[in-house]
Image: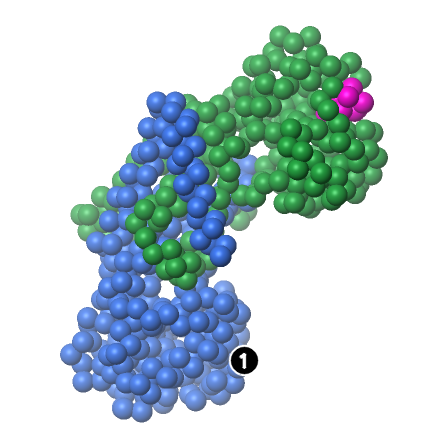
Chain colours: A green, B blue
Amino acid sequence: MKIGIIGTGLIGGSIALKLKEKNFTNFVYGIDQNEENLNTALELNIIDEKADLESGVKNSDLIIIAIPVDSARKVLPSVLDLINENQTVMDVGSTKSGIIESIKNHPNRKRFVAFHPMWGTENSGPKSATKDSFAGKAAVICNREDSDSDALAIVEKVIENLEMHPIYMNADSHDVHTAYISHISHITSYALANTVLEKEREEDTIFQLASSGFSSTVRLAKSHPEMWVPIFRQNKENVLDVLNEHITQLRKFKSALEKENFEYLEELITNANKIRGILDK
Amino acid sequence: MKIGIIGTGLIGGSIALKLKEKNFTNFVYGIDQNEENLNTALELNIIDEKADLESGVKNSDLIIIAIPVDSARKVLPSVLDLINENQTVMDVGSTKSGIIESIKNHPNRKRFVAFHPMWGTENSGPKSATKDSFAGKAAVICNREDSDSDALAIVEKVIENLEMHPIYMNADSHDVHTAYISHISHITSYALANTVLEKEREEDTIFQLASSGFSSTVRLAKSHPEMWVPIFRQNKENVLDVLNEHITQLRKFKSALEKENFEYLEELITNANKIRGILDK
């Protein structure tokens, strides 16, 4: 099977590496506006050939769109314009309602499968790609009833080869859940970084004192705006809803401290501890 | 050298394991109100003998207090009452002004060295102890001018054997900096866990969708209240100060989203990205 990867960065690159290792694909076209990324992807054997959008799409059995969600939404209709009924298109974006809406009336809608692998890092670019990133993680497919069964079967094969487990969800639920479980973490982390950068003027002290705890909590704050502004924009309502709740929760800690109500503080912390039982199932 | 560890949990246990491996000590007394922890520590060769406070302290050249900061503050004067001028006492607490204040007029004040290793995890108890936890991390000594030079030299040797690098600071600065760099991370993480637990009623969905990003940001929310309530209590003013700033920073994200001011959102994220340059020096 020939694959065309639109966006040869962290996610597209990691998928390509794994599908090559598994011999799921024997040829990968790389399509990217960023010539430097393309060249790096070629050097790293992530792709076999550079291609423009039209020839890359036309020559691939499976096209994987792995670019920021706003660009993905723009490019998807053009990709669907180019394909025939034997080709399949999937994306990897962190928001799903918008992209599905953008092609709901497209004659080739059924060749598209809306996909979201629950893995990522704070890094980007083909140099960050690694082939074993996805193993054991959840792979969400949204609105599967709107895809042809053979297109769906191909994406399910991709999921199997990535060693992920599929979860089926409608796009609106997906966007609500990812706001809770992924998007808010990024805002928290960005705001924490900004807090420390605002209050702690001595950069050397941050560097020297930063414990593994701080580094862990602030890790996502290294994530690029090119990827995250479009996600927050597309998932605005859900993210705002969770962000308001988060501010409310922080105010409870503030109030417990201000009133020196340490029993309440303990209650808040004991409740938060429940996350251990859920995450470490 | 004989060492008495008061509190055979994560930190005390990890220090004991490393100092034994390095042959810095040939005998460790374990002192702990928690009999189960003591027995586990004995089984795991973290300690060589269980002891009560009085005999454990009297028979040790170096006493390491590794219990929650409120208990440490209470027990330190009694420990100093028991020792002679050849013995040294150090703590490992995450707040420093309170404990130093508690013994400022004690006749044996100079035998105490205020210490804080910048390492910890969300876990607790002797089973979580590991000997290579501290390597490469910062070890803060506070108000060194108030300790005898031979006592200070012993703690510096401990730091060397833990493969940490010493940083000297006064206790008030320490408490300000740790509020920024360590304590606020915990509140953020607790509040994030509570947000998700409040909004996401489907525990299975949290479990299934939780990406490495979410797990990383929420990791510290597993930390026990027995340790953290006393830290927040002792460092209340500094923590509140940083918490207020953190809520202000989160409100900026809220406002950018509400007003759909995506340029401002990008600016906030780009600013947060600076943390990469500081942490990855």
In the foreground, A17 or B7: A17
**Quarter the N terminus of chain A occupies:** top right
* Quarter occupied by residue B253: top left
Residue A30 relative to residue B50: left or right:
right
Residue annotated with mark 1: B21
Residue at x 39%, y 22% (from the top left corner): B260
Q: Residue A230: image x %, image y %?
A: 50, 27
Residue type at mark 1?
Glu
Residue B57 relative to residue A93: left or right:
left
Question: Which stretch appears magenta?
Answer: A55-63
Callout 1 environment at 10 Å: few (<14), some (14 to 19), or many (20+)? few
Q: Residue B181: image x %, image y %?
A: 36, 55
Reply above or below: A276 against A176.
Answer: below
Reply above or below: B173 against A18.
Answer: below
Residue at x 32%, y 53% (from the top left corner): A201
Q: Is residue A193 visible?
A: yes
Chain under callout 1: B
Kindly give the residue lying farthest to the left in the view shown: B105
User: Is residue A74 covered in magenta?
Assistant: no
Residue at x 31%, y 58% (from the top left corner): B177
Q: Residue A48: image x %, image y %?
A: 79, 36
